């Protein structure tokens, strides 16, 4: 994602900001929790931290806060998850 220019809003903002991404990721992990194929890919019994990390990653990728990089580093972030 490129940075929006003056007067433009980011995709993050256009989609509804943190509220949108929180709900998107919560819906995903509700399904993961009961999926017989995906659930074993998450060894922790509690998916809360995985959910939080994915939300932060998606928010940053789509033009939101840089919290993911601040907490987890930024080496080639978009290349790793493209």
Image: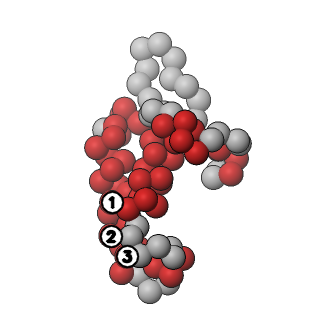
Q: Which residue is mark 2?
A: 30
Between 2 and 34, which is closer to the camera in this rendering? 34
Q: Which residue is mark 1?
A: 26
Q: Which residue is nearer to you in this view: 43 or 34?
A: 43
Label 1: few (<14), some or many (≥20) within 10 Å? Answer: some
Estimate the spatial distance between the alpha carbons at disc 2 and disc 3, rounded to whole Å.
Answer: 5 Å
> On the image, which quarter does residue 13 sit in?
top left
Q: How many marks?
A: 3
Disc 2 vs disc 3: Cβ atoms closer than 8 Å?
yes
Name the quadrant of the N terminus: top right
Q: Secondary structure at mark 2?
A: helix
Work out which residue is located at the far top of the displayed protein and give it.
6
Residue 11: image x %, image y %?
43, 35
CA separation, marks 2 and 1?
6 Å
Rounded to the nearest angstrom, the CA distance separating label 1 from label 3 is 10 Å
Graded by Cα atoms within 10 Å as few (under 14), some (14 to 19) or many (20 or more), the crowding at tag 3 reads some
Residue 33: give its label. 3
Image-based side of 73 in relation to 11, left or right: right
Instruction: Determine whether label 2 and label 1 are within 8 Å by CB.
Output: yes
Left or right side of 68 for 27: left
């Amino acid at each position: 994602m490129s940075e929006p220019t003056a007067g433009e809003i980011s995709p993050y903002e256009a989609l509804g900001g943190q509220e949108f991404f929180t709900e998107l990721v919560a819906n995903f992990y509700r399904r993961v929790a009961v999926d017989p194929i995906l659930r074993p890919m998450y060894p922790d019994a509690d998916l809360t931290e995985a959910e939080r990390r994915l939300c932060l990653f998606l928010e940053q990728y789509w033009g939101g806060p840089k919290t993911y990089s601040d907490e987890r580093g930024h080496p080639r972030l978009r290349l790793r998850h493209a």
